[in-house]
Image (spheres, coloured by chain):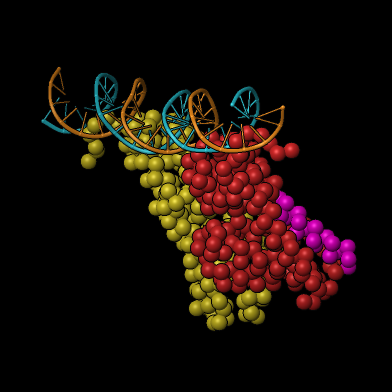
Chain colours: A red, B yellow, C orange, D cyan
DNA sequence: CCTCTTCTGTAGAGGTTAGTACAGAAGTGG
DNA sequence: CCACTTCTGTACTAACCTCTACAGAAGAGG
């Protein structure tokens, strides 16, 4: 089963992780393959043999980001005792991720949005779908709460999801502009006051 | 007083306006001088003679944007009958601007943020200062309301300004991702429910 | 008309981009 | 040991980037 031929001399997963960090920091269009291969510690032919081209490498990097970073937000939502806490956990958890000291600031996928132009339409569409997924994950959690009776039946889950997604995007930009973690947490608390005004008396917490 | 020499054969203001639209649509780093001179209908030497270089052209384009687009938001705030309406006017007016049919979507300055990397630090800093100005304009309006007794003396104006600025950035991204104007107006209404929770009983509206 | 100045188009310099040809290295299977 | 496969480093291509040298065009002042 083992493949024949000279074995790869670098760790593909580690190289992909490095590429993710570089794209996260610098965006898609503004990152050159020279930057990438230098950071990954390999030469261009190795990069292209392992990842096909810049676009495919970026897609794999985004997928890795979703599997690791974004997944932690999803888990935080699942572990919360109720819907309100789930939304708060999503927002506060995202703030922590957006301002982590050992990683680039903000959300990789949000940042990727702006750094591709019409020239990279397929990359742009890919990132767009990723962002839409965040919103539907949140909407699904809200719908589940409606189904279980935790939220009133006439709750406009889609609109609430859109609101918090929009706010989350704003947080990513603020983080990238250098906002302090503590301040962003305060902003999340403010955003959560929208909650009570929108979800009716069923949720007291 | 008239300058001697062969007169410029194009309208500098019109060319700058065109450049603004191109930068607005495509960002800084991802717009090439070839794109610019083609759109402006002039050749590279004319572009460089009139605007010095790409960075200076971008700075002038941002300044034009602030003088025209952003100024309309400021005016909407000034014309509002009270603080709350001023903030609402800022947000709703921005949504209209972000989704105007004849212009690129979203805010040019927000978009410029992500499209420059560490390579263009001076441009990045410039855009950062522009974004900070939006927040301080809003904070100033809130402070004026406190001074005039329209808002309670202990109102945390800076935090409120930070919240709405963050939300505004999120709106810009949503607009760029293709969100409908009507939906964004609904999100603004949701964001305004934060208002009553934060400003105390002095403001009933 | 002539000079002086400044603009215009052509054409290209010098650097960076994404991606690759090729020869040799380093494994596996027989 | 040898064929076969696949990776590796060097060195490159073709296209693009920002910006400019240069010659001629087009105005103003005398």
* Placement of B56 over or under B81, stated as above or below: above
What x and y, as percent, mark residue A32?
A: 50, 41
Dominant secondary structure of the residues highlighted in magenta in the image: helix
Spot the residue most to the bottom. B153
For the question of whether residue A5 can be seen, the reply is yes
The residue located at (85%, 64%) in the rendering is: A146
Quadrant in which the C terminus of chain B is drawn: bottom right
Give yes or no for residue A133 being in the magenta stretch: yes
> Residue A149 appears in which quarter of the rendering?
bottom right
What x and y, as percent, mark residue D3?
A: 63, 22
Give yes or no for residue B53 being in the magenta stretch: no
The residue located at (58%, 68%) in the rendering is: A184
What x and y, as percent, mark residue B140?
A: 49, 70
For the question of whether residue A31 can be seen, the reply is no
The residue located at (50%, 78%) in the rendering is: B147
What x and y, as percent, mark residue B143?
A: 50, 74
* Placement of A198 over or under C29, stated as above or below: below
* Placement of B109 over or under A73, stated as above or below: above
Q: Which residues are magenta?
A: A132-149
């Amino acid at each position: 089963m083992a493949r024949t031929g000279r074995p790869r001399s670098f760790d593909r997963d580690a190289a992909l992780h490095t590429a993710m960090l570089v794209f996260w920091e610098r965006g898609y269009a503004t990152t050159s393959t020279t930057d990438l291969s230098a950071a990954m510690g390999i030469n261009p032919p190795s990069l292209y043999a392992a990842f096909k081209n810049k676009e495919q490498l970026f897609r794999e990097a985004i997928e890795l980001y979703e599997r690791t970073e974004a997944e932690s937000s999803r888990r935080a939502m699942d572990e919360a005792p109720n819907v309100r806490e789930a939304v708060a956990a999503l927002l506060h958890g995202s703030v922590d991720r957006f301002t982590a000291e050992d990683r680039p600031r903000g959300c990789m996928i949000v940042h990727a949005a702006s750094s591709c132009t019409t020239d990279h339409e397929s990359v742009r569409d890919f990132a767009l779908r990723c962002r839409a997924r965040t919103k539907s994950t949140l909407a699904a959690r809200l719908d589940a709460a409606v189904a279980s009776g935790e939220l009133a039946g006439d709750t406009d889950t889609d609109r609430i999801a859109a609101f918090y997604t929009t706010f989350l995007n704003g947080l990513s930009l603020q983080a990238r502009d250098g906002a302090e973690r503590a301040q962003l947490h305060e902003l999340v608390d403010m955003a959560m006051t929208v909650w009570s005004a929108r979800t009716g008396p069923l949720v007291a917490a």
